[in-house]
Image (cartoon, rainbow, N blue to C red):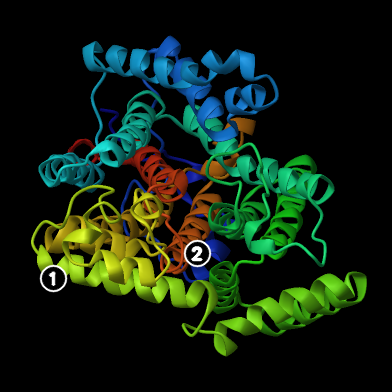
Amino acid sequence: MVSVSPMREGPMDSRPQRWSRFAASGHRMQDAPDAFSKPPAGPGARTKYVLDYRLVICLWFLFLFEPARLITYYVPALRPLKWMPELLLYATFIRWFFSPAPKRHMKWFTAFFGLMLFGTVIAFVFGNWGVARLTVRFMFQCYALGILTLTFCSTQERASTILRLYFFSFLYYAIWGLISLKMMPIASDIDPAIRKIVYWHIHFENRDGFGPYMVMGFVLSFYLYKALRGRLLKLLATASVIFCIIGIIISFGRGVFLAFIATIGYIWFKTKHKLLMAVALVAIVLVFINAAPELAHRYWETMQTISTEGTRGGTGLDRKILWGWAWREFLSSPIYGVGTGNFGVAIYRVVSYGEAIAAGYTPGRLWGRALHCAPMTVLCEYGIIGAMIMVCLLADVVRTNRRTRKNAIRFAGPPGESDSRHNLLFQPSAVVTVSDGINAALLAVLVSAFFYEILYTPILWHLIIMNRLLYVVSLLREPPGEAQAA
């Protein structure tokens, strides 16, 4: 583990003016005598496990942008291409298993994945574990990608590449959202709830996955704009903010709208320019109303159903029924739940066939049915044990984020020392800003999770990986004992 070098003598001992302003802006500098020292990178730090690193980069590209799925959508004869990302992941995981590289894990992520495996056994006991097997297979992909990333990409240069891929995947899918307006326009005779958005994607073809991802993209791109320097990067971040806002609107998701309001509130609470932000928001709303009056009117009518329709009809009534059944499942098995992905399969243990038919549900429609509420999914499928593990997991995300920001200040190097292009994300002020963005994105996920099935999509898990990656890299200047303990 890299050790902290002694304090330099000479001009660098003084705290430059811009760092004083940064410290005075509300971020307390740690009183460490070596706070500005930078340890040597160590011999061969950038050349170790190069092949593994390149494989991880390739995996992130394949799993974020899904080129194989896009190609096979248009050319079904090339369907075997869809297997390539997963096969490459398994091969890289085997390399990781036998690699001498120090292994890094995510304790509570590991615990939840283990819980899902146990839930698969429960589903098997209940008599149907088909959905559980598919769910665990997906979760293993997220888990393996996470530990591969933390093991082979734990330098600033490598982590920066991963983070850039992740951040600009939001712009990529926002552009596909714009393309959907041409492929399937928002006509007056089309229900936006059934409209396909990223029509070739398994998670983002409907608003339940696309909308929350756009809210995350909006807030992360906003903070990324503040963190980055350079006209091109700022231009891309600005485009991502604008296109993600458009994506939020065309999703017509009421839960998405509430998540968007929550992130706006977070930004407003954190900014020092509250009046200016309020004026800017009013201006944006007025521009939207004048530029697309019909779309604005229809969007507002849809959002009004949050209070006018509620749980008395439509999807609100449907979810009220499903959540009531999920609660009954929880009461029937409160400790460990009914098993992974087994909500719809196990319903007939607590609901009569006649009651299900009266609510419009047949066994075929309930098999693999999404509950559209992540907290209720955890509660009914994993019981009290699962709820406790999930709470610990989310608390660990928040704690990790806070420690990242503290590390960014405590182990900051002198200005200009890390000004190379690939290290722009790891200037102390940039790390703090990006960490704020991840916090806001987590808030968007948590609000969305009450209305959409976020748990079994990569949305939450990729964010957790990025949060942990930022923290691991922030430990590069940590004293040896602390870095190893993490």
Percent from the top left, x then y, of residue 36? 42, 46
Percent from the top left, x then y, of residue 34? 34, 46
Mark 1 vs 2, N-terminal side: 1
Amino acid at pointer 1: Leu
Circles 1, 2 touching at the beta carbon (< 8 Å)? no
Query: How many residues crowd around disc 2 within 10 Å: few (fewer than 14), some, or many (20 or more)?
Result: many
Percent from the top left, x then y, of residue 152? 37, 23
Q: In which quarter of the image is the N terminus?
A: top left
Q: In the displayed structure, would residue 326 be above or below residue 204?
A: below
Give the residue at mark 1.
331
What residue lies at 22% left-to-right and 62% top-to-bottom?
380
Residue 5 visible to the viewer: no
Q: Quadrant of residue 41?
A: top left
Give the residue at mark 2.
444
What residue lies at 47% left-to-right and 33% top-to-bottom?
159
Q: Quadrant of the C terminus?
A: top left
